[in-house]
Amino acid sequence: MQNGMYTDRERCVRAVQSKDARFDGWFFTAVLTTRIYCRPSCPVVPPKPGNMTFYPSAAACQQAGFRACKRCRPDTSPGSPEWNQRADLVARAMRLIADGVVDREGVPGLAARLGYSTRQIERQLLAELGAGPLALARAQRAQTARILIETTPLPMADIAFAAGFCAIRTFNDTVREVFALSPSELRARTPKRRTAGSAPGVLSLRLPFRAPLNPDNLFGHLAATAVPGVEEWRDGAYRRTLRLPYGHGIVALTPQPDHIACRLTLSDLRDLTVAISRCRRMLDLDADPVAVDNRLRTDPVLAPLVDKAPGRRVPRTVDEAEFAVRAVLGQQVSTAAARTHAARLVTAHGETVDDPEGGLTHLFPSTEALAALDPTALAMPRTRRTTFTTLIGQLAEGTLHLGVEGDWTQTRSQLLALPGFGPWTVDVIAMRALGDPDAFLPTDLGIRRAAQELGLPSTPAALTARAAAWRPWRAYAVQYLWATDSHPINFLPV
């Protein structure tokens, strides 16, 4: 599967006729006779090929005058894998739009973050996605509104503003145009059991993904490295606090066979879209596991590992700056020691939050709070203390950006220029914070041990040469190699 797949008409028709869920989110099918658009796996009888036309985004379908199918709910498809496996302008713009930047800062704010003119961004998005940034953000607002309508008893006026609409009339018109139902009709179609029994302010959602998904290393890693007070594993769910643009939140994520159950508590509902986007990114839910695993299976050494437990994801983060700080704290120490260092920072400098379920007590300290601390109070060697304070200083000054808009190559160069940042630290940040699917850790002790056991080259240079065949998915190869060890990161907690 590649960029621009929606232009391969024959391939799209085959996917629709076979109801192939692997293509959900890659393209959308618009039916000329009914003026409805669907995901490829829509359960209804496929239309005649002559009545099908294809679009790269839901926003493009909506702009062309099509409305969402009420059966397959195409707006709830997994996101396109393109935006997480590329670092060009369009991919970075799409990650920012998903993070709510257009709603908060407008198109000029999006352009400023990317360093391009608004005209350049609009032209490239239109060329590739058939819709500009405003239309893409509008489609996202419509989906957020639908979630709130269907999962909460909130008044429609509150939902409109929480979803990012500036006026009730615009909210009503958009929902009616996209879903062919008024907000009240949309709520009336929702089974009452979906909103009953929830505590006030708690949203229960389903996060879709492309199968297969192996939750073992994904949740195992997050649970094994959890910072007390900020994260925990409880009753089969990974829970953590979230620092968000308008406030804070607490999320509980539970792996299910066909989705991730997501329970969100937000101090400000305007943060819903951002919270969902960051949780999906942390769990790598928009990945294309079939494409990844098929490439890795071409190596006879990796093939048995993939066949044994396909669908491994790369555990990422909800906060890039937080992860970079934790990566420095974890240099040359055990997982347990890194958690201890981070917990001390959280207790001393993190903001307190109220967790109705208990267990979570703080947000991870902000960059500003860490920049104000006394470096001599840090219980770490002097050289690592210098590494820590230099990183925090550049993040606080804005000379180093680790957000979703970052250019991976440029950010790597900036990180390597910092004192104490070697290849391992930079690559682990690239893999788990920046989201580079091709990041590789040839100097990692666990990777070298796995390579030796499997008969792969164990020296960094030789292993890197061998791993060239795994590109552009070397970060996923890392997960399969790590999984050969008995470390707790590889197992779903009991």
Image (cartoon, rainbow, N blue to C red):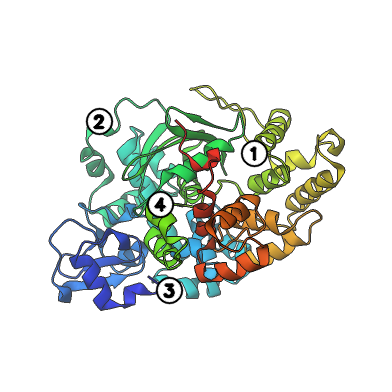
Report the residue marked by disc 4: 141
Label 4, label 3: how many angstroms apart (C-alpha)? 21 Å
How many marks are shown on the rendered structure?
Answer: 4
Report the residue marked by disc 3: 128
Amino acid found under the numbered disc labelled 2: Arg
Contact flag, marks 4 and 3 (Cβ < 8 Å): no
Amino acid found under the numbered disc labelled 3: Glu
Contact flag, marks 2 and 1 (Cβ < 8 Å): no
Question: Could one spot residue 487 in this view of the protein?
Answer: yes
Q: Is residue 322 left or right of residue 150?
A: right
Label 2, label 3: how many angstroms apart (C-alpha)? 40 Å
Q: In the image, residue 336 lies at what x, y percent?
A: 65, 34
Asked where in the image residue 177 lies, by quadrant, the reply is bottom left
Q: Earlier in the sequence, mark 2 or mark 4?
A: 4
Could you tell me which secondary element the residue under label 2 belongs to? helix
Q: Earlier in the sequence, mark 4 or mark 3?
A: 3
